[in-house]
Image (cartoon, grey):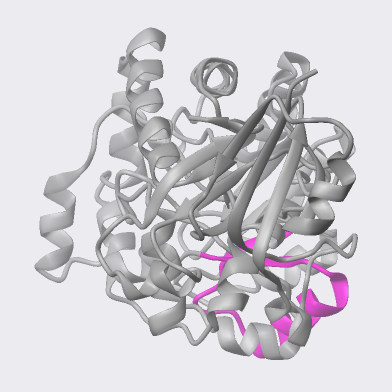
Amino acid sequence: MMDKLFRNATLVTPTDPGRPKAGPDQGAVRVVEKGALWCRDGLIRAVGPEEEVLRCLHPHEPDQEVDLEGRCVIPGWVDPHTHLCFAVPREREFSLRLQGVEYLEILRRGGGILSTVRSVRETDEETLFRATRQRALSALRCGTTTVEIKSGYGLDTETELKMLRVIGRIGRETPLDVVPTFLGGHAVPEEYRDAPDAYVDLVVEEMIPAAVRQGIARFCDVFCEKGVFSVAQSRRILQAASAAGLGTKIHADEVHDLGGAGLAAEVGAVSAEHLLAASEDNLRAMARAGTIGVVLPATAYSLRKLFAPARTMVDLGVPVALATDCNPGSSYTESMPFVFGLAVLLMGLSVEEALTASTLNAAYALGMAHKVGSLDVGKQADFLVLEGETPAVIAYHAGANPVVQVYKKGERV
């Protein structure tokens, strides 16, 4: 057994009440100005005021003691919505959007997701792994210690399974905890352009059973949006996934108020994600159902859209989480500090609400809160050392990475 003592730190963390934090509780965090953390074999054994932690250790001496020099310590970022697994970026489409071409129009022309599908289908598995690992390690340098990665750039059974193998390997061969999500319902592939219901048949009858047999994916997601999958089609995919034992998520109401947020509440999805156009009635339904709203401010920033109504969501009692949505089209960033800054400066969240959104609530959105998301006894010692004295430095020092040290299970990575 290895005992480590981290001392002389300002600890700032949400505390885990056993459920996602919502409403006024979303901004409730614990602050310990002269704090310490004791971990054994990667798990937190004691955390709090330094004197109390030292009493817990007595009469033993730690194997290693680290003086954090008064810096702020927060839980490691949990990024609950990414598309890190892709082959090549899409810079040219970025230029088209700058010229005013809408995202759904690019998709209609065979670009967007469909262009990434072509490149992923053509890329061998080892090359795809190396490209994905590079982005995953970039996220780690920014402080992400747990990350969800979706498939969804295969849109055929063979390539979706290839992507999931790559995603599973990222979890084995990097320090990150990785949560794989099957997203066969990301778009209608070109070969099914005139028969979208037949593609839904393929997802339900072949892809989901194959993903479950493979045993890597933990969740199933679907892009419920005008011109992509209808509410009825999305319901069918999510119900099939749930019946097969996968947790469910939904890309909901990103561009149009199609009713995806309401569908998430109806089917008991763990989270609805994007939500830029979600109606207040459907947000209230999410609050009643306990569905987590995962908001993606870097996507709205990149698309130059209005941000999701995160302030309204908190006020309505929807548990809010933050994510990068790292993808090659609409949000090419691995930086949770950037997302945190956008949420505080442009979405109306307080520093404390944003901290809960990017740690504990994000962990609940991945079914990982029993292991990560807060500095609580029994959880993994996943934490970040910041350059400043409070988490406000994350938004305050704009355009920089204020994370100076990243620890995963008590090891500096």
- Does residue 321 appear to the left or right of 61 in the view shown? left
The residue drawn where x is 44% and y is 72% is 255
| Image position, residue 237 (x, y; %) | 72, 45
Residue 371, located in which quarter of the rendered image?
A: top right
| Image position, residue 267 (x, y; %) | 83, 59
| Image position, residue 175 (x, y; %) | 54, 25
Residue 35, placed above or below residue 124: below
- Does residue 219 appear to the left or right of 239 in the view shown? left
Residue toward you, 286 or 375: 375
Residue toward you, 376 or 40: 40
Which part of the image, by quadrant, shows the N terminus? top right
The furthest residue to the front:
59
Residue 282, placed above or below residue 365: below
Residue 359, placed above or below residue 221: below
Which range of residues does the magenta coloring cover? Answer: 269-295
The residue drawn where x is 70% and y is 24% is 63
Instruction: Assess whether residue 292 is covered by the magenta stretch.
Output: yes
Residue 346, placed above or below residue 325: below
Instruction: Assess whether residue 411 is covered by the magenta stretch.
Output: no
